[in-house]
Amino acid sequence: MVKENLVKVEEKIKRACERAGRKREEVTLIAVSKTKPVSMIQEAMDSQIMTFGENKVQELLEKQEIITEPLDWHLIGHLQRNKVKQIVGRVRRIHSVDSLRLAKQIQNDFEKKKEMAHILIEVNMAGEESKFGLAPEETEAVIREVAEFPNITIHGLMTIAPFVEDPEENRIHFRNLHKLLVDINSKNIDNISMNELSMGMTGDYEVAIEEGATYVRVGTGIFGDRIYT
């Protein structure tokens, strides 16, 4: 199932890139493996997928105990400050930095281990109360502060769009996140040159690619419905 689903997802990514006049290599597919068994991750690996996203620190660490291959692991779920020290040196990107307090904790824990944290700033573009993330209007100020932290590199922005039946409804949020990235880059803030946009999931990643996504986070479209125990 995983192999067949990946073929379909890849075809959709290619078509979305063509519509947007972009190169396929501009978009990284993150296979969201949260709640999925290691056997399914290995199926994806058999199809040359090496980039995986996890929501929970504990689940990420448990899977890394079993899978010893050097995969690109991304933490895409809400990160609690007391869990930061557990992921130092274990993830390629933290997509969900949603507050200055969390960024300070990341700086503190990564500095202790002499490691660099590579992060994205999470923005709540739709203003949903149920979602984490900075408000668009406070994002620049937070970035200016985090830019001063020596053990953090900000690579771009991330958003989780609303769950909608029609993916076109989320186009405005993806477009506005792209505009925000361009606007912040235009300010020439010291130590900041952001080029990553993590946006789009199973239901709307094609629209996200058309609006500039460089990371798309696809779980259900690859692995099927989530498994909760």
Image (spheres, grey):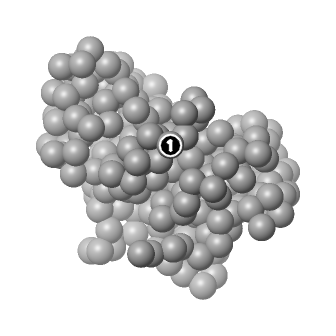
Residue farthest to the front, as pictured: 66
- Residue for point 66% across, 49% down: 42
Q: Residue at x 29, y 62 (%)?
A: 132
Where residue 118 sits in the image (x, y, percent)?
A: 40, 30
191, above or below 168, in the image? above
Q: Which of these two is toward me, 149 or 80? A: 80
Question: Toward which corner of the image does residue 22 lie, by quadrant?
Answer: top right
Q: Is residue 140 above or below residue 145?
A: below
Residue type at mark 1 is Ile
The number of numbered discs placed on residues in the rendered structure image is 1
Q: Local crowd at mark 1 within 10 Å, few (<14), some, or many (≥20)?
A: few
Q: Is residue 159 left or right of residue 205?
A: left
Spot occupied by residue 191 in the image (x, y as percentages of width and height)? 35, 19
**Residue ID at (19%, 28%):** 109
Residue 56, picture quadrant: bottom left
Find disc 1 in the rendering and name its residue.
Answer: 66
Provide residue 197's location: percent of width, then percent of height.
53, 45
Q: Nearer the viewer, residue 195 or 53?
A: 53
Q: Looking at this view, name the residue that lies furthest to the bottom.
A: 165
Residue at the extreme top: 114
| Mark 1: secondary structure | helix
Q: Residue at x 72, y 53 (%)?
A: 43
Is residue 45 left or right of 141 when viewed as pictured? right
| Residue 209 shows up from this direction | yes
From what the image shows, is residue 110 above or below residue 175?
above
User: Could you tell me residue 50's position as x and y percent?
Assistant: 65, 39
The N terminus appears in which quarter of the rendering?
Answer: bottom right
Q: Quadrant of the C terminus?
A: bottom left
Residue 74 seen by the camera = no
